[in-house]
Amino acid sequence: MKRILLMTDFSDTARNAAMYALKMFENEKVYFDLLNAYDLEFSGSPYIMQVKEELAEESLKGLKNELSLLHRRFPNARVELASRFGSLLDVVQGEVEEFKPELIVLGCRGETALENFLLGSNAYEMVKNVEAAILVVPKHAKFKKPEKIVFATDLKDFSVDDVVEPLRDLAHHFHAGISFVNILEDDYVNRFDAEDKIAAHFQGLNLSFNFIEGENVSNGILKFMDDNDADMVTLVRHHESFFERLFHPSTTKQMVLHPEHPMLILHD
């Protein structure tokens, strides 16, 4: 049975992301862990233990309230509560090591998932440091059955087939097509060989390969998504230069003008 980690800070944004995930997987056998991380913003206080206990109580109270709200919409969802003390990154890494969830779901406050990364966020730190697949859901995104998923790639092959398993499962489950948007970089890549290697990971699915050029890669991806009515964008974070190029700060202002697209981040 799948295990999916839902991150919450009790905000509307986090609740929307949890609802999105529950709707996405409502017809599958899934255990959801609803996780809240709480931490102290100061140290050295003589009342530190008392403050920590109060934070723990508030965390558990908030989780129970969120569970009640989620169960109103999805009464049959299997949701366990997890209240953890520590920094968000340390807590999530601990959960991943212990429970090995197939997916982590979190909300972002930016107008788009890409914009949220550009502005700097906990989500970006998690993507950089947590070895797990992450689904980032914009604050106003409502679940829509994905019919076309865009996969942004630099045509480098994936070293492990398991890397793309979350995307492959999602595409098979919803009978979604995958449009590979290939980012041309300076390094020479044999396009035909690369496409064959990539396609081998997605047998039985409707695939297409497309190319975009230009410095503003993020906007190029989003324009392609708009033009092709895509529902979700996927990236594999397998080396720094490609990922940082996608999230260059110069694109921040333009990103606000684009609609909301959930983003699936895979790790190689």
Image (cartoon, rainbow, N blue to C red):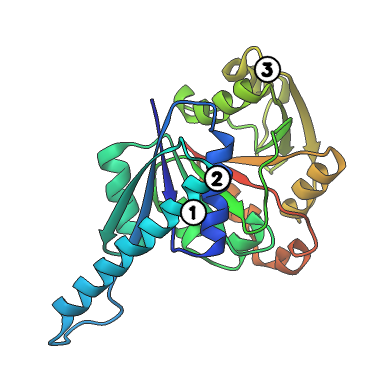
* Picture coordinates of residue 236, whole percent (x, y): 55, 39
The answer, for residue 215, to whether it is visible in the render is no
Tell me the SS state at disc 1. Answer: helix
**Residue shown at the point (55%, 47%) measured from the top left:** 19
Q: Residue at x 69, y 48 (%)?
A: 261
Q: Name the side, left or right, on which 42 lies relative to 156.
A: left
- Please say if 5 is above or below 12: above
Residues at marks 2 and 3, CA–CA distance in whole angstroms: 32 Å
Q: Is residue 57 left or right of residue 195?
A: left
Q: Nearer the viewer, residue 151 or 20?
A: 20
Tell me the residue that label 3 is attached to.
Answer: 205
Sequence-earlier tag: 2 or 3: 2
Q: Amino acid at mark 1?
A: Leu
Camera-side mark, 3 or 1: 1
Residue 17 at least partly seen: yes
Residue of label 2: 73
Say whether residue 56 is left or right of residue 18.
left
Q: CA distance from mark 3 to mark 1?
A: 36 Å
Which quarter of the figure is the N terminus placed in? Answer: top left
The residue carrying mark 1 is 69
User: How packed is label 3: few (under 14 Cα within 10 Å), some, or many (20 or more)?
Assistant: some
x and y percent of residue 115 in the render?
66, 61
Q: Residues within 10 Å of mark 1 (few under 14, many from 20)?
A: some
SS at mark 3? Answer: loop
Mark 3 or mark 1, earlier in chain:
1
Q: Nearer the viewer, residue 9 or 215?
A: 9
Which residue shows up at 47% across the image and 51% down it? 127
Q: Residue type at mark 3: give it.
A: Leu
Q: Quick check: marks 1 and 2 in contact, CB under 8 Å?
A: yes
State the separation of the CA atoms marked 1 and 2.
7 Å
The nearer-to-camera label among 2 and 3 is 2
Q: Secondary structure at mark 2?
A: helix
